[in-house]
Amino acid sequence: MRSAPTILHLDMDAFFASVEQASKPSLRGKAVVVGGLGPRGVVATASYEARLFGIRSALPMAQARRLAPNAAYLVPRFAFYRSISDQVMGLLRALSPLVEPLSLDEAFVDLEDGGAAWDERSARLAGARLRADIRAVTGLTGSVGLAASKMLAKIASEQAKPDGLVLIEPGRERSLLAPLPVRTLPGVGPATGDHLRRAGIHTIDELAEAGEDELVRLLGKAHGHALYAMALARDERPVVAERETKSVSVEDTYDVDIHDRVRVGTEVRRLADRCVRRLRGAGLAGRTIVLKVRRYDFSTLTRSETLRGPTDDPTVVREAAARLLGSVDTTGGVRLLGVGVSGLADYTQEDLFAQAAGGRGEESPGEEAQMAAPAEEERRTSVERSWPAGHDVRHTEYGHGWVQGSGLGRVTVRFETPGSAVGRVRTFRTDDPALQPADPLPLVDRSLGESERPQGGAETSDGSGAGPGGMDPGHSQV
């Protein structure tokens, strides 16, 4: 483990919900919940205001609505979130070539490798500059952890939340970890945590005191050795710039179980096409086609088929998924379907076109696909006529706004933009030709000069930030 706190972990604060609040002036300071809004939807992200009601990621949306009935419930805008994530990752790569993204809103950075930091003072300054740059470029806040290892940097960023910076000084790692609960360590989930609790182990200090042999006996060789090393603050994992993509997949959960076998087949073909679009967008191809089916009783089945070589041909993937579906009993109903491709490569094998039934190529869809085309077109038309809550629209008279809700042939829109005052609300027919879907607007007006850009809380000379309302969150150092 290195001797200076030059590994940085960035975690954007309530990312999806914060994007929505920055985009919609009327939601700032309010409880916002982003996720699937159907009866079986789950929470993707909740704003800090919503978390006061006990709402957390992965909570069933129906339960969230009971906890906070007056919160704003919005459908995710993933393409917009990704565009903002790209801006943030660009700022990280300006610090160092060694950036390890973990998700759209989270990444490790090796500051030493990029020459951005080499000791405690330079690391603190780099972290403070990064937070200021993120706020200037995106209008959002992120929490930064700095330490001599990845594990400790991630723990530090958790302690920094929201909108703070925590630096763990080398030599103080053990004293910091000792009183923390065992669930703080990576790899300790609910099941492992309960197992350790039953053994009388609640804190990381108690984990270290239990000894390596006892942990191996309780948890098995690999897990026991790893947890003992982490309890002693040992973590030699390097920051890895490129994390290999192992698979590409898509899935849908349905509000009502699907019992019709033809409908199930149509959904599988649609998912296969979506998966291929994502595959091609990443410039990849794959050899193994995977089908996932969650049935009415929550039992989940996976089936796979490995081809002779990698492909990104939609006909091949579609027909392989259909063959896999033929081996699954869906009589009782289906609540979730997924199609994935693994065994990835950055090239295709041309003769795989022959693997499609009858040797058909991409330009000659099979009879089943042709028969499904009207149903697919009907589905697309239905989607086009819907107005997802939170998504952007433009009216020929009132300008840019976002959907507050829709139903019974009506759609309610609030007309406001990221830089405007709280906007007015108007209601229209869902088929009003003056109202059309629109692309999101930037959160920060890039035409402003540097002195005019929103800077948020001022950075102090030691790199610590002022939290909301000008209060020092006490996150400058541990």
Image: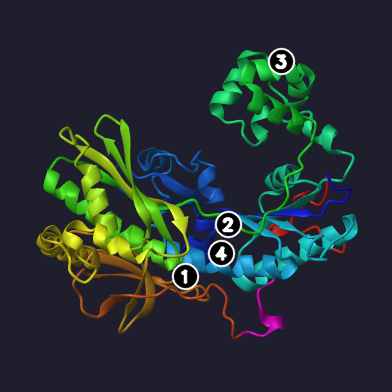
Using the image, determine if residue 432 lies above or below residue 410: below
Q: CA distance from mark 1 to mark 3?
A: 59 Å
Marks 4 and 3, the one that precedes in the sequence:
4
Read off the residue under disc 2: 105
Mark 1 surroundings: few (<14), some (14-19) or many (≥20) residues within 10 A: some
Q: Could you tell me if the residues under marks 1 and 2 are in contact, i.e. CB atoms within 8 Å?
A: no
| Numbered circle sitting on residue 214 | 3
Left or right, 254 with respect to 376, comes to right
Residue 220 x/y as whole percent = 62, 21
Marks 1 and 2, the one that precedes in the sequence:
2
Residue 62 x/y as whole percent = 35, 40
Residue 313 x/y as whole percent = 31, 63
Instruction: Write down the region rendered in magenta.
Output: 448-456
- What residue do we see at 18% from left, 67% from top? 381
Q: What's under tag 2, amino acid-wise?
A: Asp
Q: Nearer the viewer, mark 1 or mark 3?
A: 3
Using the image, determine if residue 420 lies above or below residue 341: below
- What residue do we see at 16% from left, 66% from top? 377
Does the magenta segment cover residue 98? Answer: no
Read off the residue under disc 1: 422
Q: What's under tag 4, amino acid-wise?
A: Ser
